Amino acid sequence: MAIELPSYFDLASTPYVSEMEATFKAIHNRTNASRISRICDIIAQGVLGKDKIPVLSLTFVVGGVPSAEKKSNGLIKLSYYPNNTLVVDGVLSLFAILTLLGFEHPFAKKKNSSKGFIVDHSELRQLLSKLPIQLTLLFNSAKGINRRDMISYYDLYSKKNEQLHAPLPGTLFTEEPIKQYVKEIANAISLDKYGGMVSSVRLTKSDLAITTESTMIRVLLGAIAGASAQDKNRINDFNSGKAPFDEETKANSKNLVILFFTEWLSCMKKQFDNDRDGLHYSPSVWLALGLVIHEIISTSGYEDEVKAAAQKLSSLDYSNKATHWAESGVMELDVTGTYYKNSVDGGRRFRVGLFKYFMKLID
């Protein structure tokens, strides 16, 4: 029954949910939101007896190696962990069902459920909660299904479903060349010594890591080709091997990225250890540093200049209370006058503003 879905499939706490975060967030974009709203109307009209109701069908992939026990009545009892499942088909229908039942989705920008909504739609919720849902489960009780294959199933189903506009990031389940570059950089700068990087889209306070793989990918893109490539996440261009991403340029840039961050991190360790709220954890700061490296590569490319820039910028106080941020041109104190925050519209303007500020400090 519909009300049982959250018990069998835990979308919010899946082990790989951080990797799927950008995709799940896209399900709440304007296009998908209007489609979910239409599905909600269709379901509501059918449940309330005002129209025919379609059979609601969902497909989930079950990760790991579930237990499949044959019963005497010819059925199979399947045992698995709800937090190791992933919806791969009927995604918008699932969101519509959860919306009507009053469940809030963790990746929605706005919380739609309220006491008033629940009271006003109590009859609909009660009727819908008992509605049978047709389920298809994809599993392998012999060899199991790993995380990458689970995400691949999502990709396959979403490509055949023209109604869903929530594509996977291009690097999510394939080992792209740029990922290998980033791994080599992470190893060369001993990133694990400082906490390492995670494969999620963003860091949380519970993470021990100091950056993410997606941030490092964009740092590398910015270091090689500048702000435009960084903003547009030109991973396919990187993989193509065409200028400015030819092999010689990529190799040279990688060496200078390694040189810069080896120096910067060694001097920043104390700040990383002692200030979890500082701007040294901000992706925007890391991306701006990538643009600094690009500027030095474009103007001279000298290793001593890269090292000197890293030393200068590592001497900064990256605390969000540091008064020097007032000179950046893109930050201002919050309403309490306690800490500095972004004062410009858009992430790109902020990153470029930080880059210009950093360049001013090292000139």
Image (tube, rainbow, N blue to C red):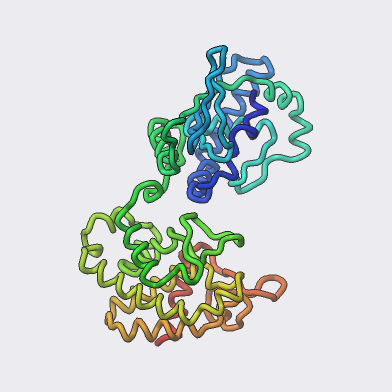
- x and y percentages locating residue 359 in the rendered image: 42, 81
Image height of 345 relative to 146, above or below: below
Image height of 268 relative to 146, above or below: below
Q: Residue at x 50, y 85 (%)?
A: 315
Nearer to me, 338 or 65: 65
Nearer to me, 255 or 64: 64
Q: Quadrant of residue 295?
A: bottom left
Q: Residue at x 39, y 71 (%)?
A: 290
Q: Quadrant of residue 159?
A: top left
Task: Left or right? Give the position of 28 relative to 157.
Answer: right
Q: Residue at x 38, y 31 (%)?
A: 160
Q: Residue at x 38, y 57 (%)?
A: 232
Image height of 16 relative to 189, above or below: above
- x and y percentages locating residue 44 in the rendered image: 65, 23
Total numbered labels placed on residues in the image? 0
The quarter in which the C terminus is drawn is bottom left
